[in-house]
Image: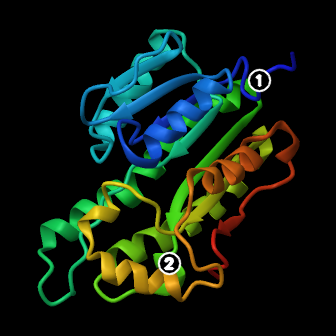
Amino acid sequence: MSARKYEGRTVLVTGSSRGVGALLTRHFLDEGAKVVGVSRGAATCEHERYLHRQADIADPDAVQQLFAALRRSGTAIDIAINNAAVLTSQYALVMPASAARSMVELNLLAPFMVAREAAKMMRKSKWGRIINISSMAVALEPEGDSVYAACKAGLTTLSNVLAREFAPFNVTCNTLGITAIESDMLRQLPRDKIDAVVARLPLPRYASFEDIANVIDFFASERSGYVTAQTLYLGGVH
């Protein structure tokens, strides 16, 4: 039997309790990884190689405390997936400042903090993969998603700059822009609006988890050490 893809690797997944994060958690476990799942809520996964940490990563202090606890337990992160996000879809004239601030804190500041702290661990082992989950909203710029799209655009730039900073210690940093996939976040939005967006894609269908996992595995692969500062959109979005 051939070895599983992530045997011996430790993967951190933010937003691990539901949606894409829960699917990624199961994917990495199935492929032999130890997974550290992070969410504000309780664990939704039970597995001998799963470690759950409750943390509000929108709080920079909570991120630092999370990684301090991992270091104390002897856990070093090899692959970090910045998946956690929040979406408030409202026109700018009516969006509360508190909603905008929440998106900036979780969708942009939190990935910076997680990437920074993970890279400190990766620097010691001289190997690492950081993968940020972005959105088709960056390219499509849908009405009502001004702050969300801006945060995800900022995530791409953040990823590209961090790729340069982390390259000397063999750590790559890439971004995957996903299209609509069945999730709790998607169910917040009017279905007819999403259907119309999907219908205009070059590949007009909803994403499957296999579409996402295919790119995640590519970015996380041992063979992708020369791939960094790249953003790949699903569905023909550009």
Q: Position of residue 44 (x, y in %)?
A: 33, 27
Q: Position of residue 112 (x, y in %)?
A: 47, 51
Q: Is residue 55 above or below residue 113?
A: above
Label 2 environment density (alpha carbons within 10 Å; few <14, some 14–19, many ≥20): many
Q: What is the quadrant of the N terminus in the image?
A: top right
* Residue nearer the viewer, 102 or 37: 37
What's the amino acid at mark 2?
Val
Label 1 environment density (alpha carbons within 10 Å; few <14, some 14–19, many ≥20): few
The nearer-to-camera label among 1 and 2 is: 1
Q: Position of residue 50 (x, y in %)?
A: 48, 18
Q: Looking at the rendering, which quadrant does residue 215 occupy? A: bottom right
Q: What is the C-alpha distance between the residues marked 1 and 2? A: 34 Å
Q: Is residue 164 above or below residue 143?
A: above
Q: What is the quadrant of the C terminus in the image?
A: bottom right
Identify the element where label 1 is drawn: loop
Q: Position of residue 227 (x, y in %)?
A: 81, 55
Q: Which mark is residue 138?
A: 2
Residue for badge 1:
4
What's the amino acid at mark 1?
Arg
Q: Identify the residue at horizontal 61%, vertical 54% (top origin).
A: 212
Identify the element where label 2 is drawn: helix
The image's colour scheme reads rainbow
Q: Viewed as shown, does residue 10 lie left or right of 206?
A: right
Q: Identify the residue at horizontal 49%, vertical 47% (top origin).
A: 82
* Residue nearer the viewer, 64 or 14: 14
Q: Which mark is residue 162?
A: none
Q: Looking at the rendering, which quadrant does residue 62 occupy? A: top left
